[in-house]
Amino acid sequence: MSNPSDTVGHRPSQVIAVANQKGGVGKTTTAINLATGLVAVGRTVCLIDLDPQGNATTGLGIPPKLRDNGSYQALLDGRPIADVMIPTGIPGLSLVTATVDLSGAEVELVGQEGREFRLRDAIQSRATGVDTILIDCPPSLGLLTVNALVAADQVLVPLQTEYYALEGLSHLMRTIDRIRRSLNRSLTLAGVVLTMFDRRNNLSEQVAADVRSHFGTQVFETVIPRNVRISEAPSHGKPVMLYDHRSPGALAYAHLASELLKRQGVEVRP
C-alpha cells in the first residue's frame, strides 16, 4: 500500500475537503458558494464533486451530456484530475463532475491497492493550474470521504445550528484525528462554519454559543443565515452569489471566502 510520502507531484496551493457526515447541513451549498466567492476575489478554483448524489454538479447547471468523465474515473481509472476538469459558466471555476456511478465506488475501491490514496494520486499526478481545490464530500465517513481527507491539506466543516450538532461534530473530529495519525499527518482543520442560522430562533443562538465555547477561534466569525435565495439558487443551476448577489446568503458566502483567505495569509484583492 502507498503512503503519504510515496508520491511527490504537482499540487495546487491548497486542497480543502468540505465535510460533515450529517446530511442537510449546507455542505454542498457551502462548497459551491465558497468556490464562487474565492473566484470573485481572484482565485482560480476546481470543485471536485465526490458525492454520488451529484448535487454540486447539478447546482452548477452542468447538463448530463457533460458528466461522463469525472470523479469516478479519477478514483477507479486513475485519470488525473487535470484531465477530467471541465469549465463552468463561472470564469475561474472548474468542476470535476459526479454521477450515480460513484455510489458503487466504495465497494469497487475495497480491492484496489492504495485505495485510500486514489484521489490524492489523481490530484498530484498532473498540475491542475488552479490555486485551490475544494472537495464536496458525501454525507458519510466511508471510503470516498477518507479519500478526500487523505488528499486534503485542510477540512472545512459546515455545521447546522440545530440540536445534536455538536454530537455529530465530535464524531467527525475523531475521524479527522485518525486520518491525521495514520494516513495524512499534514491534515488540519480550516474551521467550522455555522450554517442555516436563524437569529429569530433561540436554539440557533444557543448552538452557536456552544460550538464557539468548544472550538473557540476554529469557528469562523462569518455565519451563514437561513435565506430563501440560498434554497432557490440550485434549481436555477447557479450559486446564490450569481442568482442574487445582494441577498444575505450571497453576502455571507463572500465574507466567508475572504475570511478563509485571511486565515491562510492570502492577500485578498479589492
Image: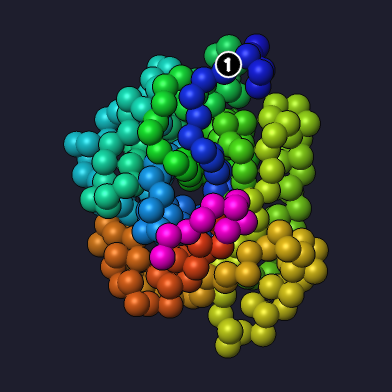
In this picture the colour scheme is: rainbow
Residue 34 in the image, given as x and y percentages of width and height: 45, 57
Asked if residue 245 can be seen in this view, the reply is yes
Q: Which residue is mark 1?
A: 7
230 on left or right of 10: left
Where is residue 125 drawn, in percent x and y?
46, 19
Q: Quadrant of residue 246?
A: bottom left
The disc labelled 1 sits on which kind of residue? Thr
Whether the magenta-drawn stretch holds residue 159 is answered as: no
Q: Is residue 270 above or below residue 145?
A: below
Q: Label 1 crowding class (10 Å Cα cut-off): few <14, some 14-19, many 20+?
A: few
Give the residues in magenta. 262-270
Number of numbered markers? 1
Q: Position of residue 144 (x, y in %)?
A: 54, 33
Q: Quadrant of the N terminus?
A: top right
Residue at the image point whose x is 51% and y is 75% from the top = 225
- Please indicate whether residue 172 sits to the left or right of residue 29 in the image: right
Q: Is residue 261 left or right of residue 49?
A: right
Q: What residue is drawn where x is 73% and y is 47%?
A: 173
| Residue 132 at x, y percent in the picture | 47, 42
For residue 41, what is the image quadrant? Answer: bottom left
Q: Is residue 198 above or below residue 243?
A: below
Whether 56 is drawn above or below 142: the answer is below
Q: Is residue 120 above or below residue 130?
A: above
Rendered image quadrant of residue 249 = bottom left
Identify which residue, 203 or 83, lies in the foreground: 83
